[in-house]
Structures are given as structure tokens and as C-alpha cells.
Image (cartoon, rainbow, N blue to C red):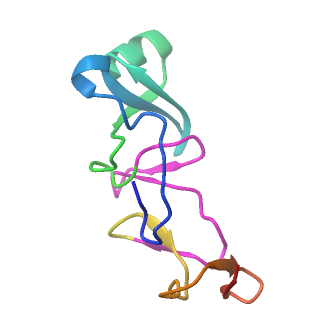
Amino acid sequence: MVNQYGWRIHHPHTHLQRDIYGMIAAKIEGSDVVQVIVAPSIAWCEANLGGTWIETWADGGVRKNYAGIGYSYDEVRNAFIPPRPYASWVLDDATCQWNPPVPYPASGHWVWDEAIEDWVPA
């Protein structure tokens, strides 16, 4: 998977196939994702492990993003939202990804400098 900045993202369960291994479930406490496991079903998780569980997909095709520990679950958006990388970044309602207030430069290697809220050469 590659995000909007061209960074390659690897999730440990992207190789799993639902029909062979079951499904991937995220345990939610409040709105926080505290555990992500492979399980036979949501009902199995709730009966055997307790708590609130929500299915997640490795490709992020449902619920906007693949759940991860430290992510939050927004019931209104029905989406998993990653941790905010910087205080100045803004949530994109369509993708539920955090975007910088200044777009990533078209060429070169850049890193975000929160003190000046802009990209600086890497």
C-alpha cells in the first residue's frame, strides 16, 4: 500500500485471506483501538474475549483505514482514524487521513517541521 505522499505502508496482515484465516477484528475501548487480531468472527470475539469488536480490512476498503493499535474508531464516520502526526494537520473527512496544512512538495525529499508548519529539505 502507498499513501498520498508516496510512502509505502506495510501492515502485517495484508497477506491474509478472509476465507482461509477468518477475519481481522479490532477491539474498541471507548473510541480507542486497543487490540487487532485474526479471529473466526466478531461474535466469537465478543463471546470469548469480551468487549466491543469491529471488523477491519487490511486494504482499508471498508471503514476508510485498516485499524491499528493507537487508532480511534469514529462511529459517525464508521471509520478508523490514525493518530494525528502533528497538531497542525487536519483530518480529511473523505479519507479519514491527516493532511498537512501545506501540500507536500512535488519533487525532492522533505520532512515536516511543526515549528514553522511547513516542509523543509530532508
Residue drawn at x 26%, y 18% is 20
In the image shown, does 87 or 119 lie closer to the viewer? Answer: 119
Q: Residue furthest left?
A: 19
Q: State the residue lying farthest toward the front.
A: 108
Vertical comparison of 96 with 49: above or below: below
Quadrant of the rendered image containing residue 122: bottom right
User: Which residue is depicted at the point 50% across and 69% down?
Assistant: 98
Would you say 114 lies left or right of 43 here? Answer: right
Drawn side of residue 60 relative to residue 103, left or right: left
Image coordinates for residue 72, horizontal then vertical, percent: 52, 50
Q: Please, is residue 7 above or below residue 71 in the view?
A: below
Tell me what residue is drawn at x 36 percent, y 33 percent.
15
Residue 55, how many percent across, how many down? 34, 34
83 falls in the magenta region: yes
Which secondary structure type mostly characterizes the magenta part of the structure?
Answer: loop
Range of magenta residues: 66-92
Vertical arrangement, residue 57 with respect to residue 116, above or below: above
Residue 36 in the image, given as x and y percentages of width and height: 49, 31
